[in-house]
Each structure stands twice: as C-alpha cells, then as structure tokens.
Image: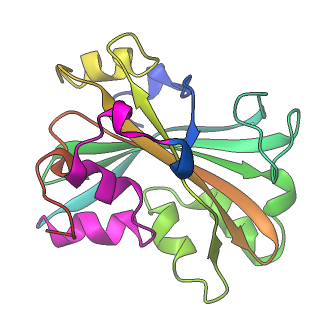
Amino acid sequence: MSTYSHLFPITLQTQWKTKANVTSQDFIPEGVFDWLIDPSSLTARLKQHNDKFNIEVLGQQVQTCSKQEANSDIAEGEQVLVREVLLFCDKKPQVFARSLLPLSSLTGEEQKLAKLGEQSLGQVLFNHADLIRKGFEIASFDQKSSLTPLLNALHLSQSTHLWGRRSVFIVKNKPIMVAEVFLPDSIAYRTKSNHA
C-alpha cells in the first residue's frame, strides 16, 4: 500500500483550457509547454532522462464522473474507475496522474486495465496499434490547489504555478481520460524545448 494512500482521491479541481485557448498571458515556460503538448508516451520520455522509473499507486476505486471531469466522450454521472498514481524517476516524484476509465470501457481485452498494479497505464495504452489520442487540455495549479496536501506529504515546496495536461485516449472505440501534473522539481521544468 502506498505511503500516500490516505490522500486518495486527490482530484484535480481546476479550469482546463484547450491548447488553442492557451495564450502568452498564461506564461507557460517554453520547455514545459513542449512536455505539455508532447503526444508520445510520457512514461517513455521520463525513462530517457533517468536510470530508475517506478510508479506508486495512491488509490483506485469506482466513482461517478463529475461535471468538471465530463467531456464529449465520458458523460457526467457515468461510472468510472478512478486511478491516481505518482510517477518517480530516481526516487524523485515527477508527475501526479489521475485517470478515468469508464466501466463501459473495461470490457473484453481492456478489462486488464483495471488490474495494472504498479504498471504504467500510458505504457500499456501506447502498445495498442489502433490507439487514438485526442487533443490536449492544459491547466495550472497554484499553491491553494487540491494538490497541496500531496505536495506537503511529499515535502515538496511550490514556489510557482504547476502545469498539467489531460487528454482522452480511444482504444477500440473505448474512451479513457488521463490527466498528468508535473510536480515541483520535475524534469519538465528543467529542460528546454524539442525533447532536450
């Protein structure tokens, strides 16, 4: 069981913006923006920068999709399996991820997605040849966000806004939504653009 299980569910209460609605006034550093709109596997990209990658599951349970998290693929009120994890590189927390897997998507081969344990959901999804990833939405998280208790538990200090993204993956016409927030001291805040 995770050291941080008592914090589950953390949720992500914020205003998401489509990539087209992000402006220069949002002050997203160039290197971070590159990570936010990278359509490839985040797990694979993190592994390129570190020797040891691991995932810690904060929690997983069936919940009702809220109005804020609903979208054109996952309806408000729909039953979803919520999974929250931390992604670590060399024992340093890099990313908080929250995934919504509609129960209607967890049929056939996709039933295994409900039993990933410490496996990366993203890595499993990117192994599907017919995977479709829809457009990104981007959001910032200030020092009073729903992430604050987690940051405190991880002993991470937040001096500026944190940035996150979310997108819907479609596997065999089944939607799955994944949101990822780069935590303080994440590699994303220290790299330049173009996958440096």
Quarter of the figure with residue 194: bottom left
In the image, is residue 143 above or below residue 133?
above
Residue 126: x %, y % from top left: 52, 77
Q: In the image, is 60 to the left or to the right of 126?
A: right
Which residue ends up furthest to the bottom in the rendered image? 129
**Foreground residue among 6 and 15:** 15
Residue 144: x %, y % from top left: 38, 10
* Residue drawn 17% across the image and 19% down it: 159
Residue 151: x %, y % from top left: 28, 22
In the image, is residue 20 above or below residue 185?
below
- Please give the range of residues in magenta: 22-50
Quarter of the figure with residue 86: top left
**Foreground residue among 158 and 6:** 158
In the image, is residue 119 above or below residue 98?
below
Q: Is residue 178 magenta?
A: no
* Residue drawn 42% across the image and 41% down it: 164
